[in-house]
Amino acid sequence: MPSNPDRRRKLEKLMPEGSIVTRQWLMEKASLSKHAVDNLVKSQQLRPLSKGVYTRGSVSLSWQSIVCTLQSIMNTDYLIGGLTALELKGFSHYIPGSRKTIIHLYGNDKWPIWVDGLISEITFVRHRRSELFATMDPATSQQCTSKVTWGGGTQELNISRPERACLEMMADVPNQISFEHAEQLFQGMTTLSPRTLQRLLEDCTSIKTKRLFLWFATRNRHSWLAKIIPERIDLGSGNRVIAENGELDKTYQITVPKQSQNA
C-alpha cells in the first residue's frame, strides 16, 4: 500500500485543484480503496460535494470543471452546444443581462442530480440531442464536434462546431433567444462551412429550425449560402408560426417579426 505522501502526490498529479471526480473514478484511476478515500476526506485532502462526488483544494468550482467531469470522468454524452458553444468560439458579442450564467448542454444520458445547485451563479439548461438530430449517425456527430481547452490548456471540453451550434441556437428562437439576439449572432457567422451546414441541414429533423436558419442566412447574405443545395433539404410543407402577430415570409413560409421584414 502506498504511503500517505506517495498517495498525496499521486492524487495531486491525477486530480488538479478544483477538479471534480467520483468515488468510482478514484478507485479505478487512482487505485484507492473505499477506506483510503474515506481517510482522504477525513484529512480534508478531498472535499465531498455530494454522495460519492469529491473535489480537491481551495480553488473555486467552475462550470467547466463540472462539464469536464460529465464528459471525461462519468463518460456521459453531454456536449456543450447552442449559445454556449458560440460564445466559447467568440461569436457572441451581445449577452443579455442576467444574474446567472446559462450553460447549454446537449445529450440523452441520465442527468446527475448533484450538478444542479452546485454553483449558485450557474444554471445548466439540458436539451435532448434527439430533438434536432434524432437520426444522425455517430460518425457525422463526431465530425460536427470540436474541442476547447481550459484550466491553463491542460484539459479539454467537447463542444459543438459553430455550424451545429448555430442550428441548436436557432431551435431556441424565439422562446429562449430573441430574434434580435439571434440576428446579432448571425451577422458574425461569415466563415461557416457550407459542406458541414449541408450535412447538418439534411440530418436535422426540425422543420422550423431549418427554415429559420435559412431565413437568417438569406437575410444576412452570407457568401456560403450560395453553396447550400436547398433541394436536398426537407423543409416540409405548410406555414409555420414562429413570431406571433408577425408577417409571413413567403419563401420559407414562416412568420417573422414585422420590423425584421423591413430591417
Image (cartoon, grey):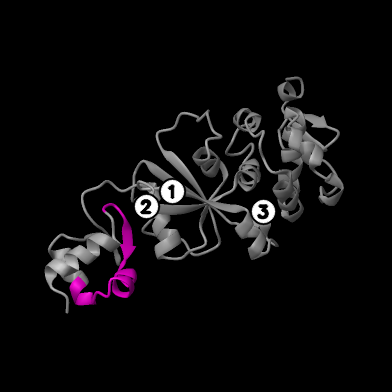
- Rendered location of residue 41, percent (x, y): 18, 64
- Between the C-alphas of marks 3 and 1, the distance is 26 Å
- Between the C-alphas of marks 3 and 2, the distance is 32 Å
**Which residue lies under the disc numbered 2?**
154
Viewer-side residue, 32 vs 149? 149
**Which residue lies under the disc numbered 3?**
132
- Rendered location of residue 232, percent (x, y): 84, 51
Q: Is residue 90 left or right of residue 113?
A: right
Above or below 79: residue 254: above
Span of residues in magenta: 17-36
Quadrant (top left, top right, bottom left, bottom right) of the C terminus: top right
Residue 120 inside the magenta-drawn segment: no
Which structural element holds mark 2?
Answer: loop
Q: Earlier in the sequence, mark 1 or mark 2?
A: 1
Please state which of the two labelled residues, at mark 3 or mark 1, is closer to the viewer: 1
Q: Is residue 252 left or right of residue 259?
A: right
Above or below 95: residue 77: below
